[in-house]
Amino acid sequence: MRLLLLTLLFSPAVFAAKDEDEVTHLPHLIGDQPEFKHYAGYLDAGDGKQFFYWFVESERDPANDPMVLWLNGGPGCSSLTGFLVEQGPWRATPDGENLVWFEDRWNKIANIIFMESPQCVGFSYSEDGECVSSDDQTAADNHAALIDFFNHWPEYADNDFFVTGESYAGVYVPTLSVLLMNDPQFNFKGMAVGNGVTNRQTMFNGFTYFAWARGLFGSDLWDDLLDNCCENRNASDCNFYNSEDVQCRLLANQVNDVMWNIGLNPYDYLAECYGGIPDRNGIIREVGGDIEMMHPDAVSMPKHRYDDYMKNYLDLNEVRNISIKIPCSDTWDREGYLNKPEVREALHVPEFVQYWEACSNNVSRWYDRQYTDMAPFYHDVLEQNFPALIYNGDLDMACDHLGDMWFTEDLGQPVVEGFKDWHYIDHMGYPQIAGFVLQYENLKFVSVKGAGHFVPTDKPGQTYIMWEKFLNNEDY
């Protein structure tokens, strides 16, 4: 296959496709147009599925720097949120009118593909209008789309290739990584997941301790949880996730309400809730759709609790056509910008393609979430000595750092260095604590202090240090 790719390098059709996808002028960019090249268009994912991508070349040495795939989660949420809000070269302004340069952009040292999947997410579509997918199908489709990418960019086929993402991409990333590491077409070198779905039980248990330690519910509820969910009231031996004890389940529902139903920002519990605290029915309508699609990753909610919640509070026929809003979040910055006709034209989006939204209810509603524990996929990757990074902002409730840290520990990798702090240099030139790290053979868990679910947005400088260490496989 490598030989085929090298042959394709000199094909006129390859050059034509690349030239057609090059973005030659980015509308409403404040400042100079980029010196690096970037491309936008569609990749063939098979069976009539067309995945939108935006590829930015490295500013340093694109011919030799790593290739990176970035995926946002949901399922049903666009990777262009990562591009325009987190680590892409530009940030959308709050009014959705312009783009501004982002100082800590990740493509300073890597070539990055931002790809929207599965079909019907963002600008991606299916020729038959079918939006149904699953964990396995999404992995297979992403694999096919990447093969198409390298058919058009064969000159990058030998570059180190990393798969990265956040949130429900905690499922997308390892499932795809296992396919790529077993495919000789790809020079797969590792994976990274931020605030990701790892293990549903561990995550929900972690959130319960998280909420208690931060004073998000009172001692009476905690005492009741110890009585009904913990062996001999031992706080280190509790099952808040799927207990058979009816009273424990009712109490765990109360804990879950803290995350989704009282008006806290689930993605950064210290941040304000955009738009203010709605009344309870308003929260249920908005978050109910969000929970139905599990974005970003209300998979931390136990299955029986999710079913009870939906049955008791929501009319699914009514929810089906609700435009999903991410709780406590304003998505107009990228929505306003990406739906400008001149922007869609510059990014080579056909007129028939749907209005861009940050998250798609249609995708989420029919998506088959097959896996509740990602450990087998991590083991497959680690057994082949590929590095993996799990990182978390420590203010996120939806995918909390405790659950992901415990998941990392439970993988049972040999410890290289125990729990310790890691540092960055502040604007005054003083060293500061950036977070904490656990280092294992080929595996690292990194927390970022003061960051929520969208870590590069909240702590861009610290995250860039982490990013560089990951690509170089450096210790802390």
Image (spheres, rainbow, N blue to C red):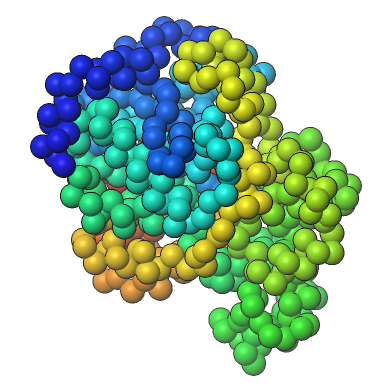
How many discs mark residues in the rendered view? Answer: 0
Q: In which quarter of the image is residue 187?
A: top left
Residue 420: x and y in percent read 37, 60
- Above or below for 168 versus 345: below
**Horizontal arrangement in the rendering, residue 391 relative to residue 351 (left or right):** left
Residue 234: x and y in percent read 61, 86
Which residue is more in the foreground, 8 or 460?
8
Residue 333: x and y in percent read 63, 24
Residue 61: x and y in percent read 20, 25
Q: Which quarter of the figure is the N terminus placed in? A: top left
At x 84%, y 64%, the residue is: 312
- Above or below for 206 versus 66: below
Which residue is more in the foreground, 467 or 183?
183
At x 76%, y 41%, the residue is: 321
- Above or below for 30 versus 93: above
Does any portion of residue 474 appear in the rendered image?
Answer: no
Which residue is more in the foreground, 106 or 3?
3
